[in-house]
Image (cartoon, grey):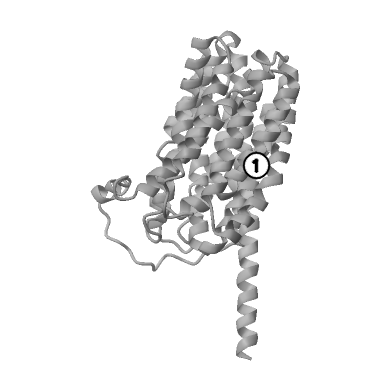
Amino acid sequence: MTRTLASADVATAASRQRRLLVWLFLVNTVLLSCYAAFIVIFIPNQVQAYDPAAKVANLAIVTTAGSIATLFVQPLIGAFSDRTRSRMGKRAPWVVIGASGSAILMILLSGAATLLWITVFYVLLMMLLNVLNAPLPAIITDRVPRKGRGVASAVLAMGTILGMGAGVLIAGAFAEMIGIGYTLFAVLVLLSSFGFVLFNRDFSSKDAERVPFSWREFFAGFWVSPRKHPDFAWAFAARFLMILAYQGVQSYLLYILRDHIHLSIDASNSFAGILTVVQLLGALVSTYASGKLSDRIGRRKPFVVASSLIMGAALAIPLIWPTVTGMIVLAALFGFGYGVYLSVDLALMTEVLPGEGMETGRQLGILNLATTLPQALTPAVAWALITVSGGYASIFVAGIGFAVLGALAVLPIRSAR
């Protein structure tokens, strides 16, 4: 009888785990579809409609402002969620707040026609989307055993990849009807986020231990000493460099297609979606299998190194083959490498944390600065490179260098294999 009850408990726990991963996949898919749709299609088109002659500089202004404004959102929300005490648990209230605020800002942004209001609403929207995003990695450390985090990381990665593809495809279809497009994304955010909270109820944190609060200690906790925790620092550097390699091309994809590959506005809108699908297919081939294999052999670093080198090689293709076909090959190879990287990235990050427990949300939020900082820097760096070199080739060259450095940065990490 005891054995039967124990088996039933194990089956129930496994069922809850599968449901949790399914909903995390759905939320992350929708979240990334929003990022991709707005950054790749909607915002560049809105900026170009405002002033075609100054589109590159103006896009840098808008996207840089959004990235700078969101730099510390995820670390702060992660830290606040660590301390949140409610019947909904620690993380769910922030999912609800982020989703609700994001939906409102999407509607407002759809009607923005001047650079000022595009920038204001875009900045606020990115902040709210980051509020929604912040609790997701912490939920994995809270509720997924260490030995299963490679699969969990791969599930989130598949959501990222599918979301990026779906976002660009949907946005491309609604490029001439952005009001409807923004509204559709708002509805998807609300449905997926509220569904996650309802069907994956967390334990109440209302009666959990309350640590005395001090603003000084609160902000001091955002510094993780590289001397005391070198693995944390190397993991931060590796992700930082990888995102720099990725973001330059992704942020300026539409303009690369128009000015480097010489496609028309309509053709570039459509072809951006095709490239995203190709990248998606390349990533799907590698993502889940890489995460599963990583869990099985207990190693993360070889996957990160291999993915960095693959992506660096892919970025060389448009330099020697600046054609539509060349961009398709780039997307396929780059997607394959990025899928390998995403499948183990989060699992690696959870293994270099100074300590799991009360500070998990904060520490993962700090590591996320390795994503938001390069996103803030990339538009300005890319604009400078384009302006100085007179073309987009310098973006690909810089991306190759960052990818190789990202591979080297992961080698000194000792707490993960």
Residue depicted at x 64% and y 91%: 1
Image check: 219 left or right of 252?
left
Name the foreground residue: 243 vs 109.
243
Which residue is at the far bottom?
Answer: 1
Name the foreground residue: 112 vs 337.
337
Image check: 364 left or right of 283?
left
Name above or below for residue 83 compared with residue 302. below
Residue at numbered disc 1: 161
**Count of numbered marks:** 1
Circle 1 — which element? Answer: helix
Name above or below for residue 87 compared with residue 238. below
Image quadrant where residue 309 sits? top right
Image check: 171 left or right of 403?
right
From where the camera sits, is residue 189 visible? no
Please state which amino acid type lies under the numbered disc 1. Ile
Residue 371 x/y as whole percent: 48, 38
Image quadrant where residue 38 sits? top right
Residue 402 x/y as whole percent: 50, 30
Name the foreground residue: 16 vs 158.
158
From where the camera sits, is residue 248 visible? yes
Q: Residues within 10 Å of mark 1 (few under 14, many from 20)?
A: many
Residue 251 x/y as whole percent: 57, 26
Residue 194 x/y as whole percent: 60, 53
Residue depicted at x 50% and y 28%: 401
